[in-house]
Image (cartoon, rainbow, N blue to C red):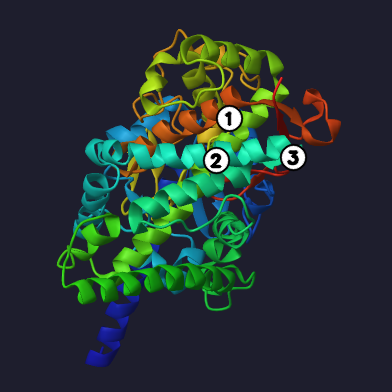
Amino acid sequence: MDLLSLVLYLLLTITLFQVFHSLVRHSKTRSKLPPGPAPVPVIGNLLKLGDKPHKSLAELAKTHGPIMSLKLGQITTVVISSPALAKEVLQKQDLAFSTRFIPNALQAKEHCKYSVAWLPVPNQWRSLRKIINSNIFSGGRLDANQTLRQQKVEELIAYVGKCCEDGVAVDIGRAAFTTSLNFLSNTIFSVDLADISHDSTREFRDLVTNVMLEAGKPNLVDYFPVLAKIDPQGIRQRLTVHFGKLLDLFGGLIDERLKLRNLQKANAENDVMDILLNRSHEIDKTHIKSLFLDLFVAGTDTTSSTIEWAMAELLQNPENLKRAKAELEQRIGKGKLIQESDISELPYLRAIVKEAMRIHPAVPLLLPRTVETDVEVYGYTVPMGSQVLVNAWAIGKDPSIWKHPTTFMPERFLESEVDVRGQDFELIPFGAGRRICPGLPLAIRMVPVVLGSLINSFDWKLEGGIAPEELDMEDKFGITLQKAQPLRAIPFHM
């Protein structure tokens, strides 16, 4: 045998060995995969997702169990649907599951390379998260901005009062969105980005809503990466447009501030913008713009959606609304605005917020994760590169955990210590572990204050004479869970 033949023989042997080893490894991994529905050729289980994957996956979990695997195109997806398994993934093996599975759409404008929501956890993520926790959502910073938040709530109630005088309906989601938007914009930029008395928030809210809907849509590219260059559904292309508009807006505000600082020849720290610009050695303009995009998209949409869902549940359940109003009248005084310091004295209001978050978690599947090596969970193997979803919506509806899980019952939390801060895995609307939503400290202050002020200042009836039991409570799926039909209600004084 000459040298060339020997080399070719060795190469062929090595190749065959590698192929055999790969097949054996795949077979072993497959045998240890969590149970799940049998995939069909090429598309796997894609057709089982439907247009409301949080509900479809919850139904599948009833058959296949709280840890379940599906083949979505070329991607193995593991779905977690119980508190015990969520604790395993989000807390006990948090580091192994801390990397994000990045939807192709989030590569628009390369946002995922700069976003604290999507970056991997090493140094850059830690630095950005530290900046957020210390300078935006720390207890001290939130306390310092309490007066500003109260002013925005007063403006909301004044607007609703004008609607009351005119006998016109309030779009609850839009009003709550504008309040959240202006609070954030004043904290960060010291300016209002919208006027609650006019429809000036529509374009911004439409942008945010479209970002959440597009990013949350099942995208063929995520299941067949070979299609990435084609972008067959045009999702990445549309997000490129939406992201571009938002990043241009934030870039313009940054440039204006830099010019002002140059004219004044001073680097004061009057707001978050100044704080970040004074830390240019830690965070550059590109990261600042992406940080603002994260804050405004996540901070406005999730907060306003939660308030809208909570109001919808109260208007559909008049007895719960009556009890909430009685608590507010007794402990605060009828017609008064709620202060953040009042929240601890309002257990039923807090219970309403928790119950709304249980039934309508703002991010029903949390943000997707992946693993960079095979990971064992409860005797099953989660293969390297898998997508991992935690179905917070399904956990909140589990009849083995919650009595009458589909019924709005705030009373269930009055004698319960279960909270939303990431330690009680039967209720994780903000996630848990190191990648828990950084905006949690603000949300748990803002939602009850806005909701309580709305129901304590006015009585309400549904627009068009709709009876409470006829209120449409359907949702539409995206990264966030929106109410399919906006809640419109008419405020009035008894």
**Sequence-first tag of 1 and 3:** 3
Task: Determine contact: label 1, label 3, CB under 8 Å.
Answer: no
> How far is mark 3 from mark 2, CA to CA?
16 Å
Q: Give the position of the C terminus as an image quadrant.
A: top right
- Find residue 431 and report its image quarter: top left
Q: What residue is drawn where x is 24% and y is 69%?
A: 284
Residue 101 appears in the figure:
no
**Residue in view at x 45 percent, y 16 percent:** 346
| Residue wearing tag 2 | 156
**Which residue is drawn at the image coordinates 29% and 47% (left, top)?**
136
For the residue labelled by badge 2, is the local secondary structure a helix, a strand or a loop? Answer: helix
Residue nearest the viewer, comparing 255 with 303? 255
**First reached walking from the N terminus: tag 1 or tag 2:** 2
Q: Position of residue 54 (x, y in %)?
A: 60, 40
Say whether marks 1 and 2 touch (CB < 8 Å): yes
Q: Mark 1 highlights which residue?
A: 454
Residue 489 lies left or right of residue 112; in this view the side is right
Above or below 186: residue 277? below
Q: Which residue is mark 3?
A: 166
Would you say residue 458 is visible in this rendering? Answer: yes
Q: Is residue 466 left or right of residue 11?
A: right
Left/right of residue 232 with respect to residue 23 in the rendered view? right
Amino acid of disc 3:
Asp
Nearer to the camera, 170 or 440: 170
**Amino acid type of the residue that numbered disc 2 sits on in the rendered structure:** Leu
Count numbered badges in the picture.
3
Q: Is there CB contact under 8 Å for labels 3 and 2? A: no
Could you say which is closer to the camera, residue 320 or residue 113? 320
Crowd class of label 1 (few under 14; some 14 to 19; many from 20; radius 10 Å): many
Q: Position of residue 171 (x, y in %)?
A: 68, 43
